[in-house]
Amino acid sequence: MSETLFNIDRLSVAFGDAAPVVREVSFELKRGETLALVGESGSGKSVTALSLLRLLPTHLARYPSGRILYNGEDLLQAPEKRLREIRGNRVGMIFQEPMTSLNPLHRIERQITETLRLHRGINGRAARARALELLELVGIQDAAQRLDQYPHELSGGQRQRVMIAMALANEPELLIADEPTTALDVTIQQQILELLGELQRKLNMSVLLITHDLNIVRRYAQRVCVMYNGEIVEAQRCEQLFAAPRHPYTRKLLDAEPSGRPLPVPQPTETLLSSDHLKVWFPIRRGFFKRTVDHFRAVDGVSLTLARGETLGVVGESGSGKTTLAMALLRLAGSQGAIHFKGEPIHGLRQSGITPLRKQMQIVFQDPFGSLSPRMSIAEIVAEGLGVHGVTDADEIERRVIEVLQDVGLDPEVRHRYPHEFSGGQRQRIAIARALILKPDLIVLDEPTSALDRTVQKQIIELLRELQARYRLSYLFISHDLAVVRALSHQLLVMHHGKVVESGPTEALFEAPNHPYTKQLLVAAGLASA
């Protein structure tokens, strides 16, 4: 049996009559190895991977040149029946977003057993038993109960494990993993990747790992192909590529890893925001009369202090209470405990008392595309807060919109365009401009870089540092990316199950963490040894 499983030979992919988006791509994938395909969004990684199984829309995609050889068989010449025999059987695929890849109308059992029925003819109890075995194999607890649930009832990490179980159902020779850990917590990321490594060794399976996270590549891949503008610009063994990158674009990617440290906090310091034993508890009601039998403690006794011009990083896994804490501090969620803003208590204020303070406390959300209205122009989006807070003069509004767009590094002429016309990084700059136009004292940044490429992340981090220095802004920075947190935060708050388990200066916590959970986060992120 040949050592080479897939041989991609001078493959080009185009859509319609347009020029190819993937050009003359060649690489080999050997049995039992992990090959990483890396590059920024739009580089052609996913198009290349989908082409391996001819999963691109047949009425749009065409292949001007090349061959896709699977065990010596050219899949570009294979009939649809043959491709169906391979898809989900000999080659499995984990898609980037499990929530949209799983059918919301079907239970987990049906989705896992579908491929068993199609390719192996396994039905009924035998199929359920195999589905149960697969869920246990990928480390899902209470697997029998999960089989009867729907995707929305599972966490992000659990849904990703279900996707892996589906892809592994028929013990494929190749697993294509398209950004399998994007937006997952670092501890879940580590679990998923270690699981894939373990299953790979057990099944002698090849893995094509598509990612823009070079930290993951460094730890889990044997060989790397770097894609830029539809071409492979560099291909090396992993350790050689990181030690001596050849292509300028590869060096640019490596240099884009979050670096630097936050600028010193201006002196003298003054406290802008503080909380004392802040609690957000949600009642758990049961029985016919829905009596409260317990509480879910989303935030449980959190005390913090944020100085003017300082960044407080808040880290922890999904469900640890990070975002709920921010919503409570902004008085957007009900809470118990004291909250002081600029020395004044705000925890007892009614909505009429909070509204005038809103312009001093702004928020930038994780997904800029979801938080920007597609029906409004950029000028309308950025200026919306001015109208809410009583600025009505059209000339003044336009002047301030132009000024703030320049502040975030955008050409003021873009104010006449709409969100769909921009890249992810540009949309995030627009979201920052919307928050900045009201000249706030505090900006809450809720995972503002998690969906962005590393090079764009670096630009946004540098922009936030620059704006902080210019306007003496305070940031409450929520993230699960510890490298980004380290680059931007002066102080750090580590949350676990609603409680603060450790806090202090960022560098001190990174260099000498005390709590086991903090150590676990750093190890999972590859920033400390186990």
Image (tube, rainbow, N blue to C red):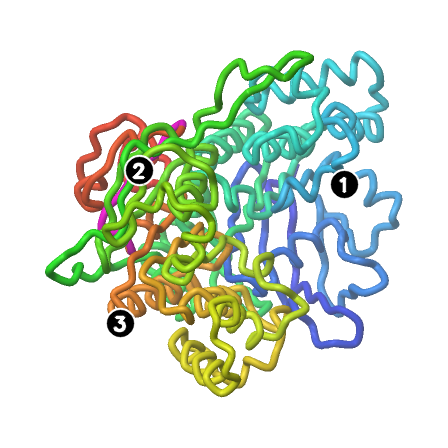
Measure the C-alpha gap from mark 2 to mark 1. Answer: 57 Å
- Mark 2 or 3, closer to the camera: 2
Pick whichever of labels 2 and 1 is earlier in the sequence. 1
Residue at numbered disc 3: 470
Q: Position of residue 173 (x, y in %)?
A: 66, 35
Find out whether residue 371 is within the magenta segment.
no
Residue at numbered disc 1: 87
Image quadrant holding the C terminus, namely: top left
Measure the C-alpha gap from mark 1 to mark 3. Answer: 54 Å
Left or right relative to 155: residue 70: right
Q: Nearer the viewer, residue 265 or 173?
A: 265
Q: Secondary structure at mark 2?
A: strand
Q: Nearer the viewer, residue 442 or 478?
A: 442
Q: Secondary structure at mark 3?
A: helix
Q: Give the number of the disc on residue 338.
A: 2
- The residue sitting at 42% across, 35% down in the picture is 335
Image quadrant holding the N terminus, namely: top right
- Image: 524 above or below 252: above
The stretch in magenta equals 488-497
Q: Nearer the viewer, residue 467 or 297?
A: 297
Left or right relative to 215: residue 144: right
Measure the C-alpha gap from mark 2 to mark 3. Answer: 30 Å
Packing grade of label 3 (10 A; few <14, some 14-19, many >=20) is few
User: Mark 3 is on which residue type?
Assistant: Arg
**2 and 1 marks in contact (CB < 8 Å):** no
Packing grade of label 1 (10 A; few <14, some 14-19, many >=20) is some
Q: Give the number of the disc on residue 146.
A: none
